[in-house]
């Protein structure tokens, strides 16, 4: 297994971990000699490090090992392990049970704990699985992986964290589990639980190359080895459900203390901010006083940041808080937005602060400035794929006009996020979005360009000619009811009745 971003540490630092610890070898390796391993060790690298866990890679001439060290820093971790003592060694026990069941999993070598250290520390040593990270490049790989998951389910193994990073492909092509902290072994696996677990795995492998293309092969491999077959439609529904749950949980982290965000409640300043953002109450007041207006008087630019303010009024929506939450929601879905820096409530004013895109221009200005046909087609195709990403991830912007879309360095950014909702987008809402976008583009974007954009947007759906004409007609009818003169859009000149679509 190839290691990346590994930092070498001295052997003395490693010995300090074992000093004063109670060591227990695995029943699979009763003659394991830790001191002999330390004497033969040629390299020691730390491959993962944070406050609560460190992972070391120990290399010897004959074998290599992984050392996982956990430290009970937080009080809730100490209470959790006090009330649930088996939780501390859950991965240790799971590795033994998987080996007994004949499941390919990492081999445990030794465990230990140091109760005298402050905070308490415990660790586990496992033998390295020789192989490579999981890749699915061919149908044969997908079928083999499906059979492996079926083997887990048939033996009652439910892995709630089953994803590619926890599977290694050995040199003989056999998948091996390397992280089994969240494994539960049941007497039998219910049908619904099988579908739920396989859907979670399918969602996780979608990020790999050709993950979607080989989904059918994965299910075929699973059904060929499992006693209970599953349909692709059922698994895809479960995968979509896992995707929504993951988006929801990651989005909510912006309103609590987490690795990236923090809750602020001091010195008259309340709200949320990124940990890398360090404005004080004085900085915010100066931005409100000295900021340069960007859009009327409620959007200001100050020291590389964009500040949106709103008076706090009863029975009115907090648009700044909505923008803060939606910025995070779009970010976790892979939709480019200016980086959200903070949300604050000061006195009777709400403020949302985001990154200022200095060289950004509005979509209408960008498309109107392109004269070469080839470049305009490329820009329209990129815009169509960008909009399709919205619909694929259940994002709906109620105010989808060109003023709310910025172009910068080859990317489109959505701004003014208080009109964004996370919900299923129906055809009527999609047509309304197209009409808003259509009405906010000037005559510099020709009718052919507009029809070409719709063609790119519906690639893969293959609507009939009659369906396309009906959409064009409804889009144009809605566009006529909007104030289009602001964008220099002459609908009568651009579209003539009876003209072929």
Image (cartoon, rainbow, N blue to C red):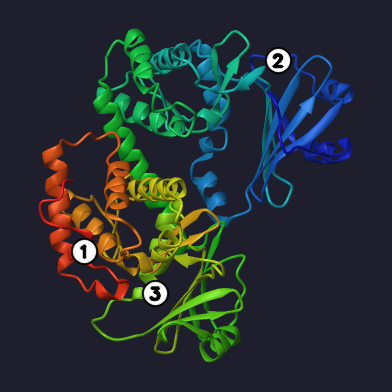
Q: How many marks?
A: 3
| Horizontal arrangement in the rendering, residue 30 relative to residue 348 (left or right) | right
Could you tell whether 196 is left or right of 48 in the image?
left
| Residue 97 versus residue 449 in the image, above or below | above
Q: Secondary structure at mark 2?
A: loop
Instruction: Give the number of the disc on residue 30.
Output: 2
Mark positioned earlier in the residue sequence (2 or 1): 2
The image quarter containing residue 110 is top right
Circle 1 packing at 10 Å, graded few (<14), some (14-19), many (20+), is few
From the viewer's perspective, is residue 164 above or below residue 385?
Answer: above
Q: Position of residue 160 (x, y in %)?
A: 42, 32
Distance CA(mark 2)–CA(mark 3): 61 Å
Give the residue at mark 1. 493
**Alpha carbon distance from label 3 to label 1:** 40 Å
Vertical position of residue 159 compared to residue 337: above or below: above
Q: Looking at the image, which residue is at 69% across and 51% down?
A: 119
Q: Which mark is residue 485?
A: none
Are the two marked residues, 2 and 1, in contact with CB atoms closer than 8 angstroms? no
- Foreground pick, 20 / 233: 233
The residue where tag 3 is placed is 320
Q: Earlier in the sequence, mark 3 or mark 1?
A: 3
Marks 2 and 3, the one that precedes in the sequence: 2
């Amino acid at each position: 297994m190839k290691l990346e971003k590994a930092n070498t540490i001295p052997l003395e630092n490693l010995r300090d971990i074992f000093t004063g610890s109670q060591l227990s070898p695995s029943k699979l390796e009763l003659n394991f000699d830790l001191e002999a391993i330390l004497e033969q060790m040629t390299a020691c690298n730390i491959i993962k490090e944070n406050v609560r866990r460190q992972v070391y890679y120990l290399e010897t001439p004959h074998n290599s090992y992984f050392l996982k060290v956990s430290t009970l820093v937080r009080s809730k971790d100490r209470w959790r392990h006090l009330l649930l003592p088996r939780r501390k060694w859950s991965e240790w026990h799971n590795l033994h049970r998987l080996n007994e069941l004949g499941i390919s999993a990492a081999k445990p070598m030794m465990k230990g704990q140091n109760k005298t250290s402050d905070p308490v520390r415990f660790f586990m040593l496992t033998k390295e699985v020789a192989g490579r990270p999981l890749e699915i490049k061919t149908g044969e790989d997908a079928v083999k992986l499906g059979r492996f998951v079926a083997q887990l389910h048939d033996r009652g193994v439910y892995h709630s964290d089953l994803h590619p990073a926890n599977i290694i492909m050995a040199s003989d092509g056999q998948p091996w589990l390397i992280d089994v902290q969240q494994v539960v072994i049941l007497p039998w696996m219910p049908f619904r639980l099988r579908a739920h677990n396989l859907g979670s795995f399918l969602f996780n492998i979608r990020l790999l190359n050709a993950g979607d293309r080989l989904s059918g092969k994965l299910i075929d491999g699973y059904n060929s080895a499992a006693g209970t077959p599953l349909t692709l439609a059922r698994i895809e529904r479960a995968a979509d459900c896992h995707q929504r749950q993951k988006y929801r949980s990651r989005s909510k982290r912006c309103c609590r203390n987490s690795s990236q965000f923090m809750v602020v409640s001091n010195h008259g300043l309340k709200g949320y901010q990124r940990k890398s953002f360090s404005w004080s109450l004085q900085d915010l007041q100066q931005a409100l006083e000295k900021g340069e207006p960007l859009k009327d008087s409620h959007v200001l630019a100050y020291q590389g940041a964009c500040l949106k303010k709103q008076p706090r009024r009863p029975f009115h929506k907090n648009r700044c808080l909505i923008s803060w939450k939606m910025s995070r929601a779009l970010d976790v879905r892979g939709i480019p937005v200016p980086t959200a820096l903070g949300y604050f409530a000061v006195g009777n004013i709400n403020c949302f602060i985001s990154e200022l895109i200095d060289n950004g221009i509005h979509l209408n200005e960008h498309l109107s400035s392109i004269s070469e046909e080839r470049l305009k087609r490329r820009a329209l195709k990129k815009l169509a794929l960008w909009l399709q990403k919205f619909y694929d991830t259940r994002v709906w912007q109620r105010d989808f006009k060109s003023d709310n879309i910025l172009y910068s360095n080859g990317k489109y950014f959505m701004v003014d996020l208080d009109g964004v909702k996370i919900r299923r987008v129906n055809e009527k809402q999609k047509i309304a979005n197209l009409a808003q976008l259509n009405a906010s583009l000037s005559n510099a974007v020709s009718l052919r360009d507009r029809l070409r954009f719709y063609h790119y947007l519906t690639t893969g759906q293959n609507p009939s000619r009659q369906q396309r004409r009906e959409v064009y007609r409804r889009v144009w009818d809605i566009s006529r009811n909007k104030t289009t003169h602001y964008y220099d859009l002459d609908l009568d000149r651009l579209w003539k009745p009876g003209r072929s679509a």
